[in-house]
Image: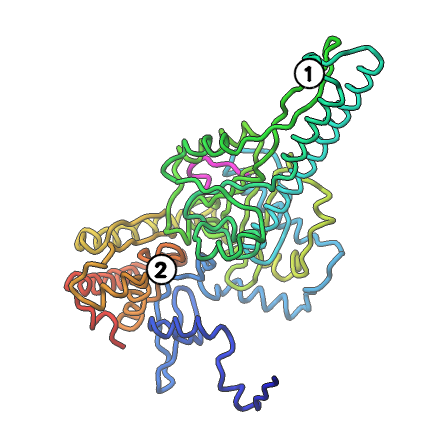
Amino acid sequence: MTHSTDSAALDGLELAEPHLGNVLSASGLDAEYVRAERNTLYLRDENGQEIPVLDFVGGFGSLILGHNHPEIVAYAKELLDAGTPVHAQFSRHPYANRAAAGLNRIVQRETGTDEPYYAVFANTGAEAVEAAVKHAEFDRFRKLSALREEIEAHGEAARAAVLAGEAAVADGRDIEDLLAEAARHNAGQLSRPPLFLTPEGSFHGKLVGSVQLTHNPAFRLPFQALAAQARFVPLDQPEQIAKIVEGERGVLLDPVVEGGSVTVAERAFPVFCAFVLEPVQGEGGINVVSEEFAREVQRVCAEIDCPVVVDEIQSGMGRTGAFLASSHTGLRGDYYTLAKSLGGGIAKTSVTLIRASRYCKDFELVHSSTFAKDAFSTLIAIKVLELLEADGGAAYRTVTERGERLREALEEVREEFPGVLKEVRGKGLMLGVEFHDQSGSASEIIAGVSQSGFLGYAVAGHLLRAHRLRLFPTGSAFNTLRLEPSLYLTDEEIGRLRTGLRGVCALLRDADGEALVQP
């Protein structure tokens, strides 16, 4: 069966993710923005006049320096006007080395380490996570291959010693029976797929591998057969890490000759590929990892030689008042992933930083990306680092001060409406406001949107229509609105947010569902 559609008809069809467009329309969030600067997006009314909208979404954490930062825009134009090559793969990229060196200086300062990190550049945050876990598995595979070869060599040595009359099996068994039993056991262990550790509420992307590290089952379960699985740890129960590790423990049997006897030693089987976590969970509801949890992650992972991948894609780049949010808790990564604000709101770029002592140089030959490490995006990243580090890190101090002021305003509204707002969470300019469940509201409208999981979207739609404020709920905690504005947030903008939140909280308190959802 064939279908034919003329060109004019095609122009009238919604072909780019039409279902998502319908969801946005139903929530009143289907605005078309035509211009942006700092914390403001502009849409046009029916008369073509621009209407400013205060943007607290901030590109889901991509705009620590705001929309269209003038210095970054000017530099981008300069690069394009100069004919800077974008596609010059398989050549020298000194600017990528400069970016890696700049990142290393900052990471070493914040973590107190002098060990360098090698950089693997990519395009998106999810790709950076994929590169990290792919490298970690590459490293695990190499170590496992070496261990298997060592055990096989020990088996051959044991057989030779018995045949030569130099040794005997300690328990009196035939050497061939012992070796066959060990081989069967080891084959079963070696066929086990790798596992990952990650906290409940985690979000690390939606690609084939990274989605398995994302806790939300709606995102993960349809694709669970495609990639390695994760074991999820409750954030408030760090003691569960060791219990999960023990429950998945595996050993390989190693025939060894000692003092004329052949015995079987147990060698730890490296089940876990990596522990992957966000210092501040973004999509999971703006949950901050505690120092206690961070310490237990590092303790257990050190015991089993499991690398720690710190996902700083949303929380990094100064968003919490430090370049790495993990530096607040003392969490140290064998890998760091950075993206979003690394491109300054202009370029699409990301990077995976890998501790030198874990780095596998051969990985560079089995992993690549067409747009990674291009001159345009990498030079923009260098400019972003310069802006963040200028004046002794003034940007980080500004984030801390602005974040405290924003949090004070949110707490004021929570105290005024304790039955509506449950909690304010987060750090710096990465904050979340959680609403109490409204399923029992006297308003059928409010109760209905709450029961269907759309309360956060209904609130966001009202704030956009009535107050020209742009906020969204987090992807896996629908009653939590996230706030990730730029460091140029003003007191006036904070006041506008306070007014809008008070207004919508009053509607929920008074069960005025019609006013909440009216166009």
Density class for disc 1 (Cα within 10 Å; few <14, some 14-19, many ≥20) is some
Determine whether 204 is above or below 50 in the image: above
Front-most of residues 28 and 271: 271
- Direction from residue 124 to residue 91 in the image, left or right: right
Q: Does the magenta stretch include residue 228?
A: no
Checking the image for residue 473, the label placed there is 2
Front-most of residues 243 and 322: 243
Predominant SS of the magenta segment? loop
At x 69% / y 12%, what residue is drawn? 170
Residue 60: in sight, yes or no?
yes
Indicate which disc, 1 or 2, sits on the residue closer to the N terminus. Answer: 1
Q: Is residue 330 magenta?
A: yes
Residue 382: in sight, yes or no?
no
Residue tagged 1:
263
Question: Which tag is nearer the camera, tag 1 or tag 2?
Answer: 1
Residue 86, quarter of the rendered image: bottom right
Find the magenta span and give its range: 326-333
Element on which disc 1 rests: strand
Q: Position of residue 450 (x, y in %)?
A: 27, 61
Determine whether 395 is above or below 465 in the image: above
Density class for disc 2 (Cα within 10 Å; few <14, some 14-19, many ≥20) is many
Task: Give the amino acid type for the residue marked by disc 1 in the picture.
Answer: Thr
